[in-house]
Image (spheres, coloured by chain):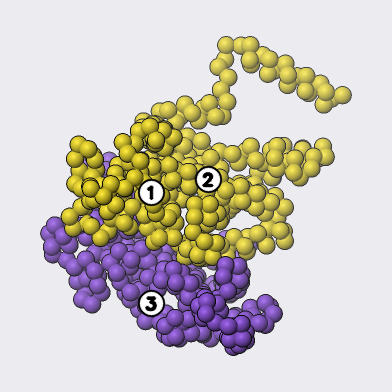
């Protein structure tokens, strides 16, 4: 187990270095001189040179990269070009909102997805099963921002019971969480159903039935526990996707989260802010995946003893 | 000499098979038969063909030019003249949705072809050569996979500038890892087969082995991946266009239409609903057809 975690950690560090490198290279090829962008067209060459020096943009690229890496390790991405606020402060403020939204959607997706999946598996082949699976397919195939708008139209405008924007009241989070979670709920429902049906075929379920264990107990204790592994893997990867997917939802509901920040930084070409957002989101994403993988190994001993060590 | 005799025997056998009444059925023929039995998948295939026809013949079907602005009919409700109404510039919404099919399908297909070229090449190289080459390519794949997808596409679009061409590149770069991973796995398995060993023993170059033996045998996997990758790319395109980083107005795209429609949801809800319906139909059709194709071509791939 320990060696598996160590190996995964090593991989993660490599990936993080790779991400920083890719981000850095992308920033180098961005058209337009950031200093000119920052100072606008009026600045004279002298000022530009001075600012260049101040930002360390006149150093060789390798030195620039190591400086960038060093600062990134301290979570220091400099100051936003336009608002002059430290990037880290802005990031943390926006991330809180995104995290709240993501967590709520995550809970929604997991609870609704697993429940629907189990019901569909138990009622296999009936109308309930096909209804739930059709619903899941729609959820997976519709863009989240469109679902968000549909929810706004139904609950915000036609029924007028829920607010369609803002993030001040807890009620305001209901629609965004459902919109963001719908797709993942559909995914989870489908995999839960497949996985449950797989497990139900196994011998130990038949044994449990033969022993006369109650059906509910079989489902909850014997089947669900073993069906959990594929579900957990999926749920784990989806947590990361939700973090980035939230930017679409944030846009629809005008929630000032990290997604909105990233879009704003991109449209205004605020490079330090952009750099910080990209590295930060990638970092969180990679960390979430690392934690998921480790917990996956905890759940399934085969990973750490079999596949984990053989390679 | 012995080998020569073997080949003549083989030829004789083939002749026999071809001349006899036994119905000779190739792998792809078989798969197609299996696919034809899957009614839902065939229905989706029809939908896809219809969508392709709509995309090709868009100028003939459209009642109006999708960029023609009619200031006398701004945000008009659905009527006989404009079946789905008009948008904030008086443009016909139905025509814009029809033209959106063009953009969505072409982006889906081109991005997937690009992703397949990169993915198949790198996946085959990594799987075939193994060792240090495999390690390097696998690490590169890990970095690409670790990047949050939407952020990555957005970053590329910002750095390279907006536009349909860059969108192809961004989405291609976004989705090649999946292809590369599966091809790598498939090649690693295939290269242990006897015919590859025989080919190697008779002095075939690595390039020849990859192109002659490994590629054709991975083709069904690639076909399935491309079909299932298209709806994915369409979804990304819609998301990026919705955020204003993809297809730029006035060019119509389902994503940027939804974004444009958002301010008017309270009194022209159909304007924002219809482009989404178009996305959903396309994505569902490709997904179900792709699943059917996967089951028909390689039942083992089924998850």
- In the rendered structure, the answer to whether residue A12 lies left or right of residue B303 reads right
Q: Nearer the viewer, mark 3 or mark 1?
A: 1
| Chain for colour purple | A
Mark number, residue A95: 3
- Subunit that carries the residue with mark 3: A
Tell me if I can see residue B235 in this picture.
Answer: no
> Tag 3, which secondary structure?
helix
Depth check: A17 or B195 in front? A17
In yellow, which chain?
B
In the rendered view, tell whether residue B139 sits above or below residue B72: below
Give the alpha-carbon distance from disc 3 to disc 1, as whole Å. Answer: 33 Å
What residue sits 55% from the left and 17% below the top? Answer: B23
Q: Chain of mark 2?
A: B
Residue A178, horizontal then vertical, whole percent: 27, 62
Q: Is residue B13 left or right of residue A121?
A: right
Q: Is residue B59 visible?
A: yes
Which of the two marks, 2 or 3, is nearer to us in this view?
2
Residue at the spot of label 2: B110
């Amino acid at each position: 187990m320990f060696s598996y975690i160590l190996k995964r950690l090593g991989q993660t560090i490599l990936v993080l270095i790779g991400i920083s490198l890719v981000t850095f290279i992308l920033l180098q090829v961005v058209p337009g001189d950031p200093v000119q962008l920052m100072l606008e067209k009026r600045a004279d060459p002298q000022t530009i040179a001075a600012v260049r020096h101040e930002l360390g943009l006149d150093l060789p690229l390798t030195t620039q990269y190591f400086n960038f890496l060093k600062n990134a390790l301290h979570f220091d991405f400099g100051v936003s070009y336009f608002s002059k606020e430290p990037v880290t402060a802005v990031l943390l403020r926006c991330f809180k909102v995104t995290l709240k939204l993501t967590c709520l959607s995550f809970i929604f997706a997991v609870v609704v997805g697993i429940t629907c999946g189990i019901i569909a598996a138990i009622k296999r082949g009936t109308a309930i099963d096909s209804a739930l699976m059709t619903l899941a397919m729609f959820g997976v195939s519709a863009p989240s921002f469109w679902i968000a708008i549909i929810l706004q139209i139904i609950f915000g405008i036609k029924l007028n019971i829920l607010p369609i924007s803002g993030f001040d009241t807890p009620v305001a989070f209901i629609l965004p969480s459902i919109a963001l979670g719908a797709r993942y709920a559909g995914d989870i429902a489908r995999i839960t159903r497949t996985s449950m049906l797989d497990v139900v075929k196994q011998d130990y379920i038949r044994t449990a039935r033969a022993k006369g264990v109650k059906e509910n107990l079989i489902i909850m204790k014997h089947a669900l526990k073993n069906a959990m592994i594929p579900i957990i893997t999926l749920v784990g990867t989806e947590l990361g996707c939700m973090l980035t997917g939230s930017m679409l939802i944030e846009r629809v509901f005008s929630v000032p989260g990290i997604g909105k920040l990233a879009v704003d930084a991109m449209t205004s070409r605020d490079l330090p802010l952009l750099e910080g957002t990209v590295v930060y989101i990638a970092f969180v994403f990679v960390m979430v995946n690392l934690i998921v993988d480790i917990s996956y190994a905890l759940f399934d001993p085969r990973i750490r003893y079999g596949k984990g060590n053989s390679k | 000499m012995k080998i020569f005799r073997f080949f003549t025997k083989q030829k004789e056998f083939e002749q026999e098979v071809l001349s006899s009444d036994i119905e000779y059925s190739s792998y792809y023929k078989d798969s197609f038969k299996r696919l034809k039995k899957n009614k839902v998948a065939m229905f989706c295939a029809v939908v896809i063909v219809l969508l392709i026809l709509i995309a090709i013949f868009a100028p003939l079907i459209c009642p109006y030019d999708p960029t023609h602005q009619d200031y006398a009919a701004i945000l008009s409700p659905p009527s006989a003249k404009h079946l789905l109404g008009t948008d904030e510039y008086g443009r016909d919404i139905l025509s814009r949705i029809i033209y959106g099919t063009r953009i969505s399908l072409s982006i889906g297909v081109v991005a997937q072809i690009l992703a397949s070229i990169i993915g198949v090449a790198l996946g085959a190289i990594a799987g075939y050569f193994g060792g240090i080459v495999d390690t390097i390519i696998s690490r590169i794949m890990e970095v690409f996979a670790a990047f949050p997808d939407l952020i990555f596409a957005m970053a590329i679009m910002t750095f390279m500038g907006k536009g349909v061409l860059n969108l192809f590149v961004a989405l291609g770069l976004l989705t090649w890892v999946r292809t590369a991973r599966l091809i790598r796995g498939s090649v690693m398995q295939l290269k242990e087969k006897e015919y590859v060993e025989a080919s190697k023993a008779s002095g075939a170059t690595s390039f020849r082995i990859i192109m002659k033996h490994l590629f054709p045998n991975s083709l069904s996997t690639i076909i399935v991946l491309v079909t299932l990758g298209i709806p994915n790319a369409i979804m990304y395109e819609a998301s990026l266009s919705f955020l204003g980083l993809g297809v730029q107005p006035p060019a119509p795209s389902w994503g940027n239409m939804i974004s444009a429609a958002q301010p008017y949801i309270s009194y022209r809800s159909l304007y924002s609903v219809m482009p989404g319906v178009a996305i959903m139909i396309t994505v569902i059709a490709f997904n179900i057809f792709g699943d059917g194709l996967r089951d028909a071509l390689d039942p083992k791939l089924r998850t």
